[in-house]
Image (cartoon, rainbow, N blue to C red):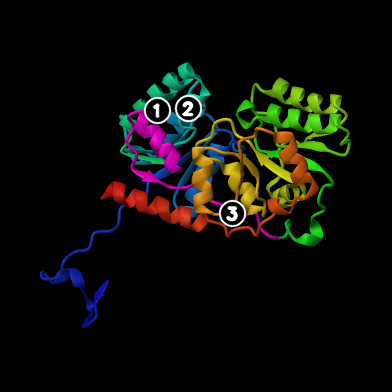
Amino acid sequence: MTDPQNPQSPQSADPQTPQSADPPSPPLTVALGPPAHGVTRFAADCAHAAGTPLLEVPDVARLADALAAHPGGPVHLHITDALFGATPDEAADAVESLARDRPVAVTLHDVPQPAEGAERCRRRARAYQRIAAAAGLVVVSSEHERHLCEAAGIAVDAVIPLPVPDLGRAGSSPDQIRPDERSVGVFGFLHPGKAVDLVAQAVAELAAAGDHAVSLRLLGAPADGHEDYVRAALETVRAAGGRAELTGRIDDDDLARVLGEVTVPVALFRNVSASGSINTWAAAGRRPLVSDSDYTREMERRRPGSLLLTDATDLPEELRRLLDDPAPTRVDPPGPELAELGRAYLRAWESWSA
């Protein structure tokens, strides 16, 4: 930068002109895990949204070698314990090892909560406590997660909500969507936490009562180790005379269309602290039926009218009503929030480095 009064003279030559420090560089974001994993994908999304460096590593065994090319530099890790170790304690060991050599910031995902079972919650909470203690910056994705962390003695520095993704608009245009006749859809990686069995039983009851046009559409793939669970859900519906489909992973370019076709979108999480799949339904212009919980009420406050809350005391009847009139499940999609996500992470990193 030059002195405007003398373009040939550097401003720094004037002893009365204060020097302005360059802003600190943001940390290297590490996207650890299989590229299709939700947390891994979200780590990459954060780096892209913020316009900051990204290091993609397929598994934790390769993490130390991958970071050897970036000695001592700060890193931001998106953590769910299963990606960082075979056990929660192994995950904590991995993060503590990295933190001995460099500054570490973390976003905690799948925050431990009592609903997952007392012993599992205790083991995971202990690991998350160690991870947070090793980090200089701790981020979570909801106020509900902040409260869970506080209950576990974990201090949170920033809450940065999960964004509504950009699905594009071509796949969701009315002339390209052919709405299903009578389908109930569950989206994402499929496991017991998404209550697939509960939804399947409700659809089966409708089929057994004579609604043979009803179908269960599982829009995704079973989470590792839950193939039999998903297979049993499909068979529950088929045995009652209904139809059932497992799509496998849906290509990004097809998401808006596929989510738009479903008659009734459902996201009845048994325990959830933050959900990318709910936001993906929103991006497709859908208002899913969700379990009434601290997190879903928080989401409804953020975007009023975006969710259909239920206590699921009579799920077959609720599904029947929405299958007959699915209008309440369709809303105008909110705009993508990736730009705000990037700005929020930049602010958090700047505060950490200050």
Q: Which residue is mark 2?
A: 81
SS class of the residue under badge 2?
Answer: helix
The numbered mark, 3 or 2, whose residue comes first in the sequence reads 2
As drawn, 80 above or below 254: above
Q: Nearer the viewer, residue 90 or 209?
A: 209
Q: Nearer the viewer, mark 3 or mark 2?
A: 3
Say which amino acid is labelled 1: Tyr
The numbered mark, 1 or 3, whose residue comes first in the sequence reads 1
Q: Which residue is mark 3?
A: 305
Q: Position of residue 65 (x, y in %)?
A: 45, 30
What range is drawn magenta here? 141-169
Give the Cα separation between the discs numbered 2 and 1. 8 Å
Going by the image, does 180 lie left or right of 71?
right
Q: Which residue is mark 1?
A: 128
Q: Residue furthest left?
A: 15
Say which amino acid is labelled 2: Asp
Q: Are marks 2 and 1 in contact (CB under 8 Å)?
A: yes
The numbered mark, 2 or 1, whose residue comes first in the sequence reads 2
As drawn, 233 above or below 260: above
Residue 184 on the magenta span: no
Quadrant placement of the N terminus:
bottom left
Say which amino acid is labelled 3: Gly
Q: Nearer the viewer, residue 313 or 75?
A: 313
Q: Position of residue 320 (x, y in %)?
A: 77, 41
Q: Position of residue 75 (x, y in %)?
A: 38, 40
